[in-house]
Amino acid sequence: MSESADRIPASLRTEALEQLLTERGLVDPKVLDTIITTYETYVGPLNGAKVVAKAWTDPSYRRWLLDDGTAAIRELGYLGVQTEHVVVVENSATSHHVVVCTLCSCYPWQLLGLPPSWYKSPVYRARIVREPREVLSEMGLELADDVQITVHDSTSEVRWLVLPERPAGTENLSEEQLVPLITREAMVGVAKVDAR
Amino acid sequence: MFSEAWEGRAFALALLSNRLAKWNLDAFRHALERLSPTDYLDDGYFGRWLNGAELILTESAILAPEAIEARARNLRGEQTREPSNPLPVSLDYAPSAEGSLRTVDAQPAFAVGERVRAKDISRPGHSRLPRYVRSHVGVVDLVQPASVLPDTNAHFEGENPQYVYTVRFDSRDLWGADAEPFALTIELFESYLEKAA
């Protein structure tokens, strides 16, 4: 690849690659479109939010989720590529969990979609395992000194999902009404859920 | 999700390229690790996938080196001669099952609560043993299902399925007495670990 100043834009090289593979029949453009649509439409943080909302409103599901996250998530149909085995950890007033992959950007695709840019950034990957309280504070999450922090570096095919704390003031909301409050940031552990 | 249309296409093309070459997930990750700093960083996350796809396709002799560059130049109106297609190399390596999880007959070598040390393994090639835990002692928190070993699977040298352990480290053991107090867990493959006194 050219290292020169006239480096060809990635968009143009992507178009070139697609042409080269499709004209030889190696890639079917319809398959390509299906993959893109899948990740734009069906695979995203809404899936994880449904898991969390169910756990918040169904005590027996919550216990199952924390005890055997993989089985409880399989029940809702959210296992698959990049989400083969899941461990769920619960954030509370005294204990806070946050997830990273220091080696690349491993992330539970089926539950949260493709990772956001901050999760993939070399800075987040390097610093959250060294000074999580400081990094979380810079990201807008201030934790009291007595809150125990656990950082999960997900370097294998085990995926971690954070079950955020249910915010006060949401006692009367239904499972369906809770879902839109739950953000991917809260399910990675860099934010809390707001009652809004 | 994809902030520009090409990003989604690069993402999907990379997945399909890996499949086309009959490579596996570990080999794909290793391809991204082998990119030059420019190719890893300059085009963003999905540019990294595009450049990884190019590396996979050229190493598999599905595309000639410079094929993408030449086509891209022609797409923007230059008159560049495109290389002919190379003779494909066939890869005699196939996964024993879908995904990464496997069952093994052996019992786990380490138990929950046991103190273990991450070995100081440093060899060329792919590994999932980060430098910052090497030689440090932690405690087994969870025994996870057995999984293919990325170190050999990425190089098509065998799956070597083995147990994975969630090991808990104290931040001060990793970073020194002045570190923020916190716990860190990380998944480590059985062959990365040894018993600690």
Image: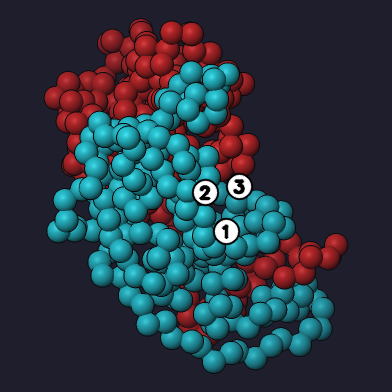
Chain colours: A red, B cyan
**Where, quadrant-wise, is the C terminus of chain B in this rendering?**
top left
Q: Which mark is on residue B33?
A: 1
Residue A75 vertical position relative to residue A2 in the rendered view, above or below: above
Q: Distance between the residues labelled 1 and 2?
A: 9 Å
The chain to which mark 3 is attached is B
Residue A165 vertical position relative to residue B13 in the rendered view, above or below: above
Amino acid at pointer 3:
Ser
In this view, the mark in front (2 or 3) = 2
Answer with the quarter of the image where residue A60 lies.
top left
Image-based side of A110 in relation to A33, left or right: left
Discs 2 and 3 carry the same chain letter:
no
Q: Which of B191 and A53 is in front in this view?
A: B191
Q: Name the residue under label 3.
A: B3
Furthest residue to the right? A5
Instruction: Tell me if residue A107 can be seen.
Output: no
Image-based side of A27 in relation to A46, left or right: right
The chain to which mark 2 is attached is A
Give the mark nearer the N terminus: 1 vs 3: 3
Task: Identify the element where label 2 is drawn.
Answer: loop
| Residue B86 percent location from the top left of the image | 58, 90
In this view, the mark in front (1 or 3) = 1
| Residue B167 percent location from the top left of the image | 35, 36
Residue B165 vertical position relative to residue A145 in the rendered view, above or below: below
Instruction: Tell me if residue A86 can be seen.
Output: yes
Amino acid at pointer 1:
Glu
| Residue shown at 58% from the left, 78% from the top | B58
Q: Mark 2 points at which residue?
A: A104
Answer with the quarter of the image where residue B37 lies.
bottom right
